[in-house]
Image (cartoon, grey):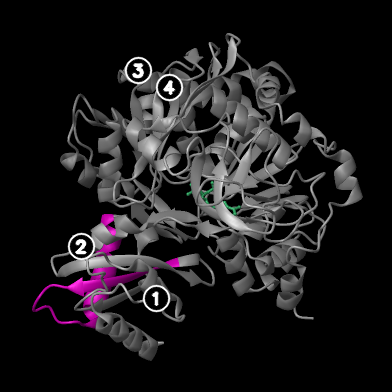
Amino acid sequence: MTEERSARSLEEKEMFFPPKEFSSNAVIQNSEIHELGQDRNEFWNEQGKRLDWFKSWDTILEWNYPFAKWYVGGKLNAAYNCLDRHLKGARRNKAALIFEGEQGDRRVFTYQDLLREVSQFANVLKSLEVEKGDRVTIYMPMIPETVIAMLACARIGAAHCVVFGGFSAEALKDRIQDSQSKVVVTTDGSYRRGNSIPLKANVDRALPSVTCINNCVENVIVVKRTGQPVDMIEGRDIWYHEAVENVSIVCPAEAMEADDMLFILYTSGTTGKPKGVVHTVGGYMVGVSTTHEWVFDLKEEDVYWCTADVGWITGHSYLVYGPLSNGATVVMYEGAPDYPEKDRYWKIVEKYRVTILYTAPTAIRTFMKWGESYPSGRDLSSLRLLGSVGEPINPEAWMWYYKHIGREQCPIVDTWWQTETGMIMMTPLPGITPLKPGSCTIPFPGVHIEIVDHAGDPVPKGKSGYLVVREPWPAMLKTVYGDDKRYEDTYWSQFKGLYFTGDEAKWDEDSYFWVTGRVDDVINVSGHRIGTAEVESALADHPFVAEAACVGRTHEVKGQAVFAFVSLKEGIAVNDELVDELKAHVVLKIGSLARPDDIFLSTELPKTRSGKIMRRLLKDIAEGREIGDTSTLADVGVINFLKENIDARR
Ligand code: WT7
């Protein structure tokens, strides 16, 4: 049987069990843990004790629908929990962060080292008058200073807003403006496949157009990474290495209310404007710490590697706050998986004897395409657990990961969650949960997830519906920054009393969940959320474009790709160069992650009689399938024209 066929026939039926030895040594061995989680308040009350609190909480949860406050009355500090408390014991000189640069350079920070660096940079921020509650934008590549800057903010109670280094100057501007950050931390540049990408120059381009309400962006702190030339503006720009020189290495950690803001992270939604998802200190830290330990079966001696960029929530929760709060040794890699060769990841696993690897289906499918000779040429025997996140993992990719990376010895934890959930919500617990390739299995203890129909009623087993969360959970977002109404409208208005995830899912006979994808106008490209409205407004911004409509189409490696339909203004001729120009325009407006794979130019888009673009039909065309019901179209000719021309191109 081919690998592909065997994978397909496994679907929903066959289960994979963890090796006996794995189960008998697992952190969680007792399957009654899920029952324990049914008393949610009691369960999370118990888990709260895993952190160090300056003051214990009085009330576990205040639920003022749809606003939750967890660990009310408690005081703590996230950086203290990630650093200081480990210094009391044997972890003092343990490697906290092992950094591997793309060029092969390496830096290792013990917990003690990291505390020193963080405290010092926290003092730099303080000297720039960054105070509790202020925002700091971090626009950086995957280097240790990024983690240090995040923890330094957490230490003094400033909220960090990390902006992924792949975003353009314009996207950066929107995020700085919305957060009204007082300081921006960046680098001269970042390495990617041996080239250097100018980050500081993007900051310089972004800042002049930021509308500032009060003292925003007074300073830019620049880490020297690539050594490329940058313009330093007198009085505003400061070199990181100069700023930390001779600064005290002692900085007390601010006692934060559990409900104080820890960070803002922007994510795409159904409108053109990205949402600033707000996470708070107490609930978030308990959520990520608990899930990180249990889902990844963390032991003292593990070497844990999460390949996600810190610019995304996975980097926040499972590269920084989860693992460091648990005293883990974390590997951080700066660059591309195929630099200098396609076996870079496996070389890193071999070099550091990585035991736990957390990556994304799109990466796995890329490795599949490159072929198994790359992993098989390296010693991967240290691996004992594999993780997946970001999008549904197809059973073929699951099987390949299991076989060629995990030697059929490593359980795979397929973890479902979101920027908004802060923590993993559905996942196997690797010592006790039998696995089904392609299913994220069951909710984490203490999390109440359901699948409901249009009316908000639970669907029976075997059926699909909308994925919702019924009760508050500790790491849930607090709000959308500066916009409580948008928070309420986006997440709590579709189904009364339920948090709507935007996903569709199915429930099988064994009560396992199968998430099939988004039902809103969000495209999941390589595990990154792209809002169709954002790409559409980027396209519409081009002087030749009349209108644009984007849909997601299935893509072999990326999961989904952006397919854009564009109608041009009167008198503009359709030509191939214009397609390239429009793609470049999207990159300029948002970043290369949003670049459409296909752009189809025409004179008109298919609309209903009331003038609404029929995306459903465009999606049918993009996917190359039969076109659905066209009876509400104003002019069927438009859709026929599109279909014929696109089919002819295929
Ligand atoms: C969306 C959230 C939080 C991780 C990084 C993405 C999809 C995420 C899975 C999974 C199926 C998944 C969902 C979700 N998703 N993980 N294991 N199986 N789908 O975070 O950008 O906030 O996107 O990613 O559609 O809603 P995000």
Q: Residues within 10 Å of mark 1 (few under 14, many from 20)?
A: few
Please name the residue that numbered disc 2 is placed on.
540
Please name the residue that numbered disc 3 is placed on.
131
Q: Secondary structure at mark 3?
A: loop
Give the numbered dot on residue 629: 1
Give the numbered dot on residue 207: none
Residue range of the region highlighted in magenta in the rendering: 561-589
The quadrant in which the C terminus is found is bottom left
Dot 4 amino acid type: Ala
Q: Would you identify the image quadrant in which residue 610 lies?
A: bottom left
Q: Would you identify the image quadrant in which residue 282 lies?
A: top right
Dot 1 amino acid type: Asp
Vertical position of residue 542 compared to residue 411: above or below: below
Task: Tell me if residue 103 is in the magenta stretch.
Answer: no
Going from the N terminus, do you reach mark 4 or mark 2 first? 4
Residue occupying image coordinates x 31% and y 50% = 271
Going from the N terminus, do you reach mark 1 or mark 2 first? 2
Give the numbered dot on residue 122: 4
Q: Secondary structure at mark 1?
A: loop
Q: Secondary structure at mark 2?
A: helix
Q: Is residue 280 left or right of residue 26?
A: left
Looking at the image, do the residues carrying marks 2 and 3 touch, with CB atoms under 8 Å apart? no
Q: Depth-wise, is mark 4 or mark 2 nearer the camera?
A: 2
Asked whether 60 or 594 is in front, the reply is 60
* Percent position of residue 502, x then y: 48, 50
Residue occupying image coordinates x 64% and y 46% = 305
Vertical position of residue 547 compared to residue 333: above or below: below
Q: Secondary structure at mark 4?
A: helix
Vertical position of residue 390 compared to residue 93: above or below: below
